[in-house]
Image: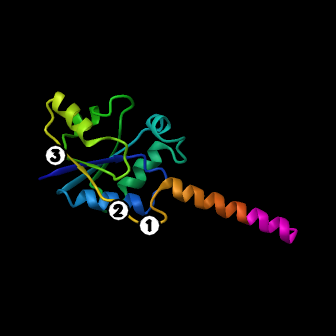
């Protein structure tokens, strides 16, 4: 049984997330997904729109996911030590370097393969892209209201 671990913030679920998790699942038999805590999301990306418990629940509901867990603040390798995956799947845009992760895992005596997954080429493949599209839509609507006198 090959256990694959994937991780992320998963703030607004979108096609890029689903692609990432489907590709990760193809690497093994079981997919464990680590959802970043609110504090981790704030420190690495942005203020989360959805709270961590809601994000874990949403990820757990996906058919491709066998188990969703909340990560830890601080030491990101603690959850790896607890879950003991065979493979860690990285998204194409995740800032972690494969060599950096492999080196730290080796220092901790963890034999885990690290795999970088391919990008999904889609205009709504990222949370920031979706947020920008909503902002753009809102600005256009506001201009139309002014022009039409609404």
Q: Secondary structure beneath disc 3?
A: loop
37 or 134: nearer the viewer: 134
Magenta span covers which residues? Answer: 141-150
Residue 32 position (above or below residue 42): below
Q: Residues within 10 Å of mark 1 (few under 14, many from 20)?
A: few
Residue 48 position (above or below residue 16): above
| Earlier residue among tags 3 and 1 | 3
Give the quarter of the image for residue 120.
bottom left
Tell me: 109 left or right of 23.
left
Give the quarter of the image for residue 95.
top left
Q: Is residue 108 visible?
A: no
Residue depth check, mark 3 versus mark 1: number of the one nearer the observer? 1
Q: Which residue is mark 1?
A: 122
Tell me: 57 left or right of 132.
left
Residues under numbered marks 3 and 1 in contact, where contact means CB atoms less than 8 Å apart: no
Q: Secondary structure beneath disc 2?
A: helix
Q: Which mark is residue 19?
A: 2
Q: Residue at x 44, y 66 (%)?
A: 122
**Disc 2 and disc 1: Cα gap in Å?**
10 Å
Q: Secondary structure beneath disc 1?
A: loop
Q: Which residue is mark 3?
A: 86
Is residue 145 found inside the magenta-colored segment of the image?
yes
Q: Residue at x 52, y 48 (%)?
A: 50
Q: Is residue 115 visible?
A: yes
- The image shows residue 104 at horizontal and vertical percentages of 22, 31
Residues under numbered marks 2 and 1 in contact, where contact means CB atoms less than 8 Å apart: yes
């Amino acid at each position: 049984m090959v256990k694959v671990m994937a991780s992320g913030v998963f703030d607004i679920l979108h096609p890029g997330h689903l692609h990432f998790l489907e590709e990760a699942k193809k690497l093994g038999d079981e997919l464990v997904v680590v959802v970043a805590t609110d504090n981790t999301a704030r420190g690495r990306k942005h203020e989360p729109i959805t709270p961590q418990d809601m994000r874990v629940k949403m990820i757990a509901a996906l058919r491709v996911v066998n188990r969703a867990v909340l990560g830890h603040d601080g030491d990101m390798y603690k959850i790896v030590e607890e879950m003991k995956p065979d493979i860690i799947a990285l998204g194409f845009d995740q800032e972690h370097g494969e060599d950096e992760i492999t080196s730290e895992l080796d220092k901790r005596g963890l034999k885990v393969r690290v795999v970088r997954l391919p990008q999904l080429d889609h205009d709504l493949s990222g949370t920031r892209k979706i947020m920008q599209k909503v902002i753009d839509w809102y600005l256009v609507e506001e201009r139309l209201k002014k022009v039409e006198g609404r």
